[in-house]
Amino acid sequence: MAKNLLIVESPAKAKTIEKYLGKDFKVKSSFGHIRDLDKGTKGVDIENDFEPSYVVSPEKRKVVKDLKDWVSKVDEVWLATDEDREGEAISWHLCKELGLDEYETKRIVFREITKPAIISAIEKPRKVDINLVNAQQARRILDRLVGFELSETLWRKVKGKLSAGRVQSVAVKLIVEKEREIRDFVGDNYYRVVAVFEVDNGSGSKVELKAELKSRIPDLKEAEAFLNKSKGSNYIISNIEIKPTQRKPAAPFTTSTLQQEASRKLGFSVNRTMSTAQRLYEQGLITYMRTDSNNLSETAMQGIEEQIKKEYGDEYSTPRKFKSKDSNAQEAHEAIRPTYIENQGVGADRDQQKLYELIWKRTIASQMSNAKIEKTEVKIASSNVSDADFRANGEVLKFDGFLKVYLESSDEEDEGENEAKGMLPPLHRGQNLTLKELQSTERFTRPAARYTEASLVKKLEELGIGRPSTYAPTISKIMEKERGYVTKESREGVERTYQYMVLVNDEIVKEEKTEITGATSNRLYSTDIGMVVTDFLEEHFGSILEYGFTAEIEAQFDIIAEGKKEWKEMLKSFYGPFHEKVENTIANAERAKGKRELGKDPASGHTVLVQITRYGPVVQIGTREEVGEDGKPRFANMKPGQSMETINYEEAMELFKLPKVLGEYKGEELSVNSGRFGPYVKYGEKKFVSLPKGVDPLEFSKEDALELVAQKEKEDAPVGTYKGEDITKGKGRFGPFLKYQNYFVNVPKRYDFENISIEDMHELIAAKIEKEANRYIQQWPEDKVSIENARWGPVIKVGRKFVKIPKNGEEKYTAEELKELPYEQVKIWIEEELPGTFKKKAPAKKKAPAKKKAPAKKGATSKKTASKATEPEKPPKEKWVPKVKKVKKKRSSADK
């Protein structure tokens, strides 16, 4: 039996570390956080000095029980969670839940999972750093309070199911501002003039030398005049300037720079990068992946130097130390690097191999010599146009240095028009040049580029918003479909014309050409909901969305982490004014709809407008006042790419041409329409098929629809039967499925969906039917309440929310006991976690005006009503009080 228990965060890490420590240590995983703030009452007792209320997550109860068993078996417990604030907080929560003394329990940290690092950490244990824990608690509590209260405000004033947060709302604001900057951009056109000369390459053959006019020409008239003036001109090289220069390597990766480069070079999302890096770290292949530091340890630098000299030669090695841009770089004090630089091409899957290679190259390059480059600039003069200044640029790589391994990418969209590639031919000052042609091309200024995930991370870091551990979850949150704030899209560009003129043999040839402009790939777009929510928050909670304020809050957390500020005082100073704004906004603010009137409908005379409804942004004909009680406004969904802020009257009216009847199919109407999930074809009573992505429903023909319906019917044709009824196949948002009766049966990846056998279908359907039969223990459909068997045991479900079932004394309730549980007891538990759930129904019961018609008997009626409201509840209460009291008593003593 092991004498020591070492607790880490992930099971993969546990396996790796246990190999290094031997039989005296048992290494177990907490699987991340074991407990969090209780959701029932925000998890914070504001009146009691912001005292947090933590509960073990339902899915972690088994983990905690297992850890407690091990704690009782060993002599000593060691905590080895990650080195950042989240990891420190996990260690503290483990102490609290496992009955350990946080001031005495040994805590070890390491930045890489290698045997020397682990042994070294065991030899130098420390205690839990309460300052780091407090910084994490302050962040968690503040974000919970801000998130809960802002989200509740949005539900009341904008739309249900929305969320807001201290960091996520600022990230959305950045994207909204960029969207509007692009929308409001007014481009200018200009003319770019390029001279193409024929010169000798020194070997007897002719090559082209391109030189661009340094100044831009503002319009077509002046561009044509310049070409006319250049007829018969002679050209001479007036000067050649050679400049030696050097290019330095980038620093080793921090969390944000890794996310940026993985996005640019590998096309990885921020989430994909971090999950892949996590797996590499857990296998001991790279150092800790959440860090602000560019620093490399002395040992690492020595190993890298040896590797460079061995692979590339002494001249390629230039050891250097990098200073972090952030003076408050968080607690993990080393950059992301391979644990053993000699290991190349490692990783369990392709993603891991790609990311490891990127980290390896960046680390090696950071310690290599500068690249030496010789840049040449040639000035060319025209005899006919005295002020014409043509420039040709070239460069020669004299020594590749770190470029032999790695070159950092950029987010900037560079036209590359001003940069020459490679060497220039042999040239000398005073040399006469033969003009082949003089080109004048119309060009256009461009708006700023939309954010990618990588450039958004870069911007957040520049502004000091968030920390390494928050970038990935922030970006994931704002892109959730349920929120609808931001989408990541690749959009096709639009065709535009431009003017092109060329002077050849003193003759000007004019031509109108076309090009595609505005195409994007994996860019972040703000939605209408994102814009309306941002405007609402800016209006009522402007300070929360200020970039400087958000960065200042992060700085406050850093001060708490250093032990220089009391965390609860920080919460007090923030929450008071904030909560006051929330209450004032809920009481006085108008509902935000992003409403914009576009004109009048010629047929009805009603207003044509756009606004946010509970189903999202719509175009609407007729307000409630205009159509009256008996009428209904007409609604239309906007096409993909259309926005409430930019759609015009003509575009809006075009949308009301739907639904469009295309003809008949098998004697029933065939039509095309657009709904909240996009455009679709309808045939028969209730049969629908979605149009392919990007297809305009107004241009969809009957032939197109018939082809789509035929394809759908082929897909929906029965593929077998089960107990005499048809089985069909389909593919939905959650993957492939079988449909049998009213059951949708997900088909796991282990099955070949296209060739699934009838036996496998029967097995999956039977399992689904059995699972559904065992799902409900008790149901109260009128209140949307049920007790269900979930993955981790029985739970109470209220609408879409879940409420945990407390213990019956020391033991959990059995399924048989839950079957007999009275609804009144279930209501009590629901009210404890979700206060006001049943009170919300009271107004509906008091709506009947008949009960309030007799003023003279108002008092008596009141008493009578009160009596009727309470009388029916007395018998069940009397019947079940002893049991309820018993349950509560046992529960509280168990908690103690």
Image: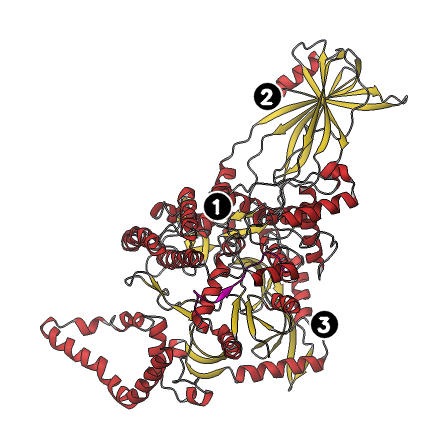
Q: Quadrant of residue 719?
A: bottom right
Of 412 and 353, nearer the camera is 353
Q: Give the residue at mark 3.
A: 752
Q: In which quadrant will I find the N terminus?
A: bottom right
- Return the x and y of residue 366 as percentages of the image width and height: 66, 42
**Mark 3 surroundings: few (<14), some (14-19) or many (≥20) residues within 10 A:** few
Q: Which residues are magenta?
A: 101-113
For the stretch drawn in magenta, the main secondary structure is loop
Q: Residue at x 43, y 43 (%)?
A: 547
Distance (Cα) linking label 3 and label 1? 52 Å
Q: Give the residue at mark 2.
A: 218
Asked whether residue 882 appears in the rendered view, the answer is: yes
Identify which amino acid the numbered label 3 is placed on: Asp
Distance (Cα) linking label 2 and label 1? 48 Å
Q: Is residue 782 above or below residue 815?
A: above
Q: Earlier in the sequence, mark 2 or mark 1?
A: 2
